[in-house]
Image (tube, grey):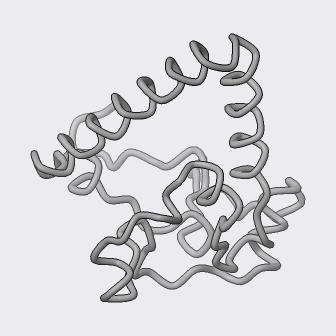
Amino acid sequence: MMEGSVPFIHEPVDVLRQGLPSAKADAQAAHPLQAKLIEEETKERKKELRMMENVFGSAFPIKVQIEEKMMQSVQRLPGLPSSNLVAEALSGKLDDFGFEDVLGHKPEESEVTMPGVHSLMEKRLGVAKAAPSRELP
């Protein structure tokens, strides 16, 4: 590449469908307390699965994990919020009472507005029109 020249984007970036790139959000580490809570939750889950295996046999925890994975994959159309009520009931998170129950805000929900349902379905099905390339001859 010549010195002083501008690099070209070889693949078009669709900001409406993919969102704005954010290097700061990718590089930013989670809060230490949040990391500790996630670690504690995974330890508790492993302990619970071991206990199920000891009581009900080795097939039962596998069955529970398959059911949870199936329930987490069931969602509404893209762009519409999904409550995942069945997944919460299977995991036991439905019985937990946290700050999001009082404040009405879940931490995983984004503040950014989502693109339309049609554009997200086009992207998922691979029929979205690609923007023209901006390469110069």
Residue at far left of view: 32
Residue at far bottom of view: 103
To which quarter of the image does residue 38 belong? top left
| Residue drawn at 27 percent across, 34 percent down | 39
Residue 1 placement (x, y as % from top left):
35, 30
Residue 132 placement (x, y as % from top left):
71, 62
To which quarter of the image does residue 111 belong? bottom left
| Residue drawn at 30 percent across, 33 percent down | 2
Closer to the camera, 99 or 33?
A: 99
Residue 96 vertical position relative to residue 111 in the rendered view, above or below? above
Residue 102 placement (x, y as % from top left):
32, 87
| Residue drawn at 76 percent across, 15 percent down | 59
Residue 58 placement (x, y as % from top left):
69, 11
Closer to the camera, 43 or 109?
A: 43
Residue 122 vertical position relative to residue 51 in the rendered view, above or below? below
Q: Is residue 7 left or right of residue 124?
A: left
Q: How many marks?
A: 0
| Residue drawn at 71 percent across, 40 percent down | 69
